[in-house]
Amino acid sequence: MLGVADMYGLDGLKEVAIYILKRDYCNFFQKPVPGKQQPVLECMAIAHSLGVENLYAACMKWVGKHFAKCLSERSFASLPTELQNNCLVMMINSLVSTY
C-alpha cells in the first residue's frame, strides 16, 4: 500500500501506511519482545526500498539500541547486504562517538 501511495503521490494514504507500519510492525518502537525483532527489520527494509527516510531512520535508531538482539535474528541475516552494512556502520559510529 505504501508503494502504491508513493507511486501515485497520495500523501495522505502514504502517511496512513507509515502509521500502520509503525503500529503493526514496529509496535511504536517500544522495548523489544524476545524473538520479535523481525517486523522492525522488515519495516526497515521496506522504508529503505521506498525511500521513506524518516521511517528508515527511526528503524535504524531502534536497531542501534537493540543491536545485540537484532543481530541474532534470522531476519537480520536475510536483509540485503547494504542494510546489514548500514546497521554495522551505524553501530560502530555510535560506539566511537560515545568515547
Image (cartoon, rainbow, N blue to C red):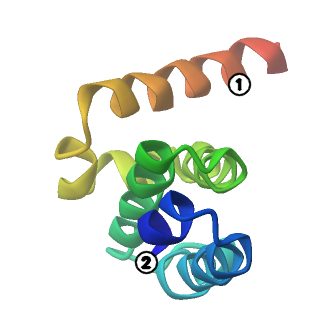
Indicate the amino acid at tag 2.
Answer: Met
Q: Report helix, strand or loop for mark 1.
A: helix
Front-most of residues 17 and 67: 17
Front-most of residues 69 and 7: 7
Nearer to us of marks 2 and 1 is: 2
Dot 1 crowding, Cα within 10 Å, few <14, some 14–19, many 20+: few
Q: Are marks 2 and 1 in contact (CB under 8 Å)?
A: no
Dot 2 crowding, Cα within 10 Å, few <14, some 14–19, many 20+: few
Q: Quick check: 90 above or below 23?
A: above
Q: Report helix, strand or loop for mark 2.
A: loop
Q: Residue at x 26, y 57 (%)?
A: 73
* On-image quarter of the C terminus: top right
Q: Quick check: 35 above or below 83?
A: below
Q: Residue at x 55, y 61 (%)?
A: 6
* On-image quarter of the N terminus: bottom left
Residue placed farthest to the right in the image?
Answer: 98
Q: Quick check: 40 above or below 36?
A: above
Q: Position of residue 60 (x, y in %)?
A: 59, 45
Residue 39 located left or right of residue 77: right
Label 2 belongs to which residue?
A: 1
Indicate the amino acid at tag 1.
Answer: Ser
Q: Position of residue 92 (x, y in %)?
A: 58, 18
Is residue 30 something that shows in the picture? no
Label 1 belongs to which residue?
A: 94
Q: Residue at x 41, y 56 (%)?
A: 46
Q: Residue at x 17, y 46 (%)?
A: 78
Name the image quarter holding residue 53. top right
Q: Position of residue 83 (x, y in %)?
A: 38, 33
The mark that comes first in sequence, 2 or 1, is: 2
Q: Quick check: 71 above or below 69?
A: above
